[in-house]
Image (tube, rainbow, N blue to C red):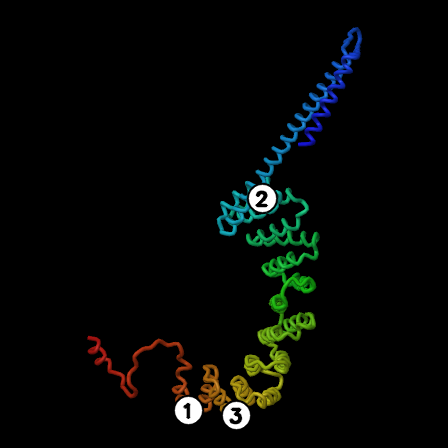
């Protein structure tokens, strides 16, 4: 309040002073331009100058505010468009997660150009189009994604490879992934996709070259990586035989041995691969070679199935083979598979009595149709017919397992004559 009062006093003072000066001397101002001149008092000139200044100042402020209002409107309009695009993108992603592919594609495509990151919209819309089977639309959306963000070529390429893989387009997918490998050689996800493509293409040699890189990049968990290695080298071993179908068993054995010894050192000690190698040796008749592999495996880890297989092999020296199996009996005296194997090896060495004893002990430990068949066959050839019949009767459930429950006659009942059967039917 005091400030206003002081300001009014100052204005009154200035006004009184100016009025006094105007009465004392009005002065004059002359403005001339060409043949035209304008003359006025100095005080009128000052008043016009002040008014002109104020008008110009007001006009400039008005123009500036008009320009600012236009900018504000544009900013408001852009913000509104971004908000609408954001809402559509959010609804589109929700529809995508719910499997509403048509709605997701429509919303994501519509909001892509007005979104700050159109790449996300185009990639998600491409997936929705792929799920609907619209492959051309999907490819167009992927191209738009590539054009909208050229620096995101790796992301777009990975999405394209995933879609090609889902379509079963293995060769184009492989080309896409190999191109990505050149651009991003350390990208672990590209390696994982390459692994899947190589498996589906049965390109085991390429996969074997990729496995060390998968290990260095830690692209797979250790268990998954081991399974991949085992699958890969199993197939490589099988291919070494299948590629020499017309060759002799000796040539197949050599090819198989070369493939086996060319594997990484730690895999030769892998039990699963060694067992598969053994099965392949047996399949081409290289049982003598398989015998040595089985013995090495059993030294590392006891395996009932391998023991069973050992008894089926025809080794180079049946007596030494039997002695080897007898040595295992000290540590595994109740193993049914070892007892079965000892029976077979005793029979191979024509030790008939010992073979019968081992078969009976194995059958006692674990009644199995396989053991029963071996024992019955041997007894039959030894002329033990009654003993064979008693054995089969006692273990009939092993032979006829899985039969339905049906009524049976009492023991000792005689078969009815044909005439009596007809009367019963009538």
Number of the label disc, if any, that sits on residue 141: 2
> Which residue is depicted at the point 56% across and 83% down?
311
Number of the label disc, if any, that sits on residue 426: none
- Image x and y of residue 406, in percent: 31, 77
Q: Looking at the picture, tell me which residue is in the foreground, 155 or 251.
A: 155
Number of the label disc, if any, that sits on residue 387: 1
Q: Looking at the picture, tell me which residue is in the foreground, 209 or 106.
A: 106
Q: Vertical placement of 111 versus 6: above or below? A: below
Number of the label disc, if any, that sits on residue 354: 3
- Cβ atoms under marks 1 and 3 closer than 8 Å: no
- Image x and y of residue 255, in percent: 66, 70
Q: Vertical placement of 165 versus 67: above or below? A: below
> Which residue is depicted at the point 23% across and 79% down?
421
Q: In the drawing, does residue 260 fall left or right of residue 420?
A: right
Q: In the drawing, does residue 37 fall left or right of residue 367?
A: right
Gap between marks 1 and 3 measured at Cα: 16 Å
**Label 1 CA crowd tier, 10 Å (few <14, some 14–19, many 20+):** few
């Amino acid at each position: 309040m005091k400030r206003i009062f002081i300001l009014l006093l100052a204005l009154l003072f200035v006004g009184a002073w100016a009025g006094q000066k105007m009465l004392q001397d009005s002065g004059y101002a002359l403005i001339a331009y060409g043949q035209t001149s304008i003359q006025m008092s100095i005080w009128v000139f000052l008043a016009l100058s002040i008014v002109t200044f104020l008008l110009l100042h007001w006009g400039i402020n008005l123009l500036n505010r008009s320009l600012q209002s236009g900018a504000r409107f544009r900013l408001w309009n852009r913000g509104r468009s971004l908000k609408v695009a954001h809402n559509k993108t959010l609804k589109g992603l929700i529809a995508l997660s719910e499997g509403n592919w048509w709605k997701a594609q429509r919303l994501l495509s519509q909001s892509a150009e007005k979104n700050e990151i159109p790449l996300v919209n185009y990639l998600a819309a491409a997936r929705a189009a792929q799920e609907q089977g619209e492959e051309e639309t999907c490819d167009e959306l992927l191209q738009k994604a590539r054009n909208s963000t050229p620096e995101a070529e790796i992301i777009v390429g990975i999405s394209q490879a995933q879609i090609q893989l889902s379509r079963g387009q293995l060769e184009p997918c492989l080309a896409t992934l190999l191109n990505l490998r050149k651009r991003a050689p350390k990208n672990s996800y590209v390696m994982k996709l390459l692994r899947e493509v190589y498996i589906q293409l049965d390109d085991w040699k390429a996969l074997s070259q990729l496995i060390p890189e998968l290990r260095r990049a830690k692209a797979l968990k250790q268990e998954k990586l081991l399974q991949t290695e085992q699958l890969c080298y199993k197939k490589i071993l099988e291919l070494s035989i299948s590629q020499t179908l017309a060759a002799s068993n000796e040539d197949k054995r050599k090819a198989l041995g070369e493939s086996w010894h060319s594997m990484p050192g730690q895999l030769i000690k892998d039990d699963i691969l060694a067992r598969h190698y053994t099965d392949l040796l047996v399949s081409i008749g290289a049982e003598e070679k398989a015998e040595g592999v089985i013995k090495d495996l059993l030294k590392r880890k006891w395996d009932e199935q391998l023991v069973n297989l050992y008894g089926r092999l025809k080794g180079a020296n049946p007596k030494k083979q039997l002695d080897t199996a007898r040595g295992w009996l000290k540590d595994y005296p109740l193993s049914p598979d070892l007892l079965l194997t000892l029976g077979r090896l005793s029979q191979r060495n024509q030790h008939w009595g010992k073979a019968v004893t081992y078969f009976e002990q194995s059958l006692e430990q674990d009644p199995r149709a396989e053991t029963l068949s071996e024992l019955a066959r041997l007894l039959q050839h030894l002329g033990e017919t009654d003993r064979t019949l008693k054995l089969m009767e006692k273990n009939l459930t092993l032979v006829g397992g899985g039969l339905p429950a049906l009524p049976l006659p009492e023991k000792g009942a005689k078969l009815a004559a044909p005439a009596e059967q007809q009367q019963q039917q009538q």
